[in-house]
Image (tube, rainbow, N blue to C red):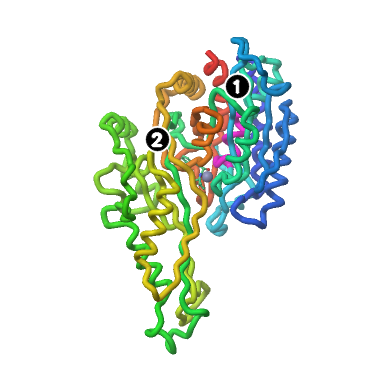
Amino acid sequence: MDKVLAYLESQNDRFVASLCDYIRFPSVSAQPVHSADMRACAEWLVNYCKRIGLKTRLCPTKGNPVVVATTRKSGPKKTTSKKRKPHFLVYGHYDVQPAEPFDLWTTKPFEPVIRGSSLFGRGASDNKGQHLAHLNAVEAYLATGTELPCDLTFVVEGEEEVGSNNLENFLKANRKELQCDAVIISDTGMPAIDKPALTYALRGIVAVEVRLSGPSRDLHSGIYGGTVDNPAMVLCQLLAKLRDKNGKITVPGFYDEVEELSDFERNQFKKLKLNEADYRKHLGVEKLFGEKGYTPVEQRSARPTVEINGLTSGYQGIGSKTIVPALASAKLTFRLVPNQEPKKIIQQIDSYLRKLCPPTVKLTVEDGHYGEPYLVSPEGKYAQAALRTLRKAFGHEPVVMREGGSIPIVTQFKKILGADTLLLGLALPDDNAHSPNEKFDLRCFANGMKMGALLWPELVG
Ligand code: BES
Ligand code: ZN
């Protein structure tokens, strides 16, 4: 192991340079103009994996291709003998969120720059830097001729940020090859540089787009206003009815399956000690808002929410324009917690909006991507091994936590491959995931590589 760790240290500068190369691809999965960039980025990754010595292929899907890279020399062994090496899957995503609004970036999103201990660029921590750390750790094993105690297969997809719609079929089609003892993902966060974390729950999500259409074209608001309904106004009225002043979602049936938090868990949450003043400052708000009766830690990791992600209607350019707009639309997401079923929730949202919508406008609710909530015990043997690894790699006591973000494919790993997932995140709270000026702390990168090296012997035991 000393050799492996020494190798990682000696190659650190090159690893950082490679991460910069990786970030230069504007692999924005949400925007069709970037489809060639997606492919180029995936091909870069294929070459990266091949150079390390992994058997690598680019697998087409109906959407962006999936990179599969393995340490196995041949296919999965049929033998059930005790000599079978354990097999672990490492998952990541090479797609990134849109970088807009560009003018709020200090330096360009796809031209990575190091400032202080951080590397700035879209995708630096979400998720290019995090899975590259694992790949580099494996490189260190292979380059130093150190035997891995297990087989490893990397699955790096290009559609996580848009809901992983094609990955489920990919997993089904490659079930045999991907069958594994556990999945390891570094795509979550850690509370601070000296607080490594094992995340044992993620929220689920459903995304819907609500569209209202009124008159057949934008109308002069002086000539027609007062006789025709305004889709933008109706949209505001509808959206305002989705949540009450106590932060409760008003969609009938929405909370029916929500599992209440146990006293044990609420006590655990208290230990995470979020400093409210610092938190407010970090977010730039004077006062927090959240569901009454729950602490901020609970509200953002273990309670369901609704968010408006984007609103569109009428004239948005410079100066004024006097119209009744023909159209209004909103992109909504609901975060879900254990036992809430995305499909059922979409139904509930749809019927509620239909009931509320007046006959003066036409409503369409288009359902987008969705993912189920995930929860696994942090007490299993792999989770314990992961905690030992974090302790060694970071030199600090790890925390165990739930997080509010979503990784839609995680529940499919369980359903299709029968494997639980260990979430070992390397992103810091101020890494600006999905925001302008995303960054990755290079100390987390280095510690992440160390973690990636120490993990395998620890898991195999
Ligand atoms: N890395 C995040 C997920 C995450 C972030 C989990 C922080 C826990 C803490 C991931 O890339 C992500 O952003 N997922 C999307 C999924 C969605 C588009 C289906 C999300 O959570 O918004
Ligand atoms: Zn993300």
The magenta-colored residue range is: 124-134
Which mark identifies residue 117? none
Q: Which residue is mark 1?
A: 87
Q: Are marks 1 and 2 in contact (CB under 8 Å)?
A: no
The image quadrant that residue 272 belongs to is: top left
User: Picture quarter containing residue 401?
Assistant: top left
- The residue most toward the top is 82
The residue at the point 55 percent across, 42 percent down is 126
Q: Amino acid at mark 2?
A: Arg
Q: Is residue 126 magenta?
A: yes
Specify whether 172 is left or right of 213.
right
Q: For the residue carrying disc 1, how many other residues have a C-alpha within 10 Å: few (<14), some (14-19), or many (20+)?
A: many
The x, y position of residue 385, in whole percent, is 48, 19
Q: Amino acid at mark 1?
A: His
251 to the left or right of 80: left
Q: Main secondary structure of the magenta part?
A: helix
From the viewer's perspective, is residue 334 above or below residue 213?
above
Q: Does 229 lie within the magenta span? A: no
Q: In percent of the image, x 32 and y 62: which residue is there?
A: 241
Numbered disc 2: secondary structure: strand
Q: Which residue is mark 2?
A: 402
* Residue 368: x %, y % from top left: 51, 54
Disc 2 C-beta below 8 A from ligand 1: no
Q: Is residue 300 above or below residue 75?
A: below
Q: Quadrant of the N terminus?
A: top right
Asked if one can make out residue 2 in the rendered structure from this viewpoint, the answer is no
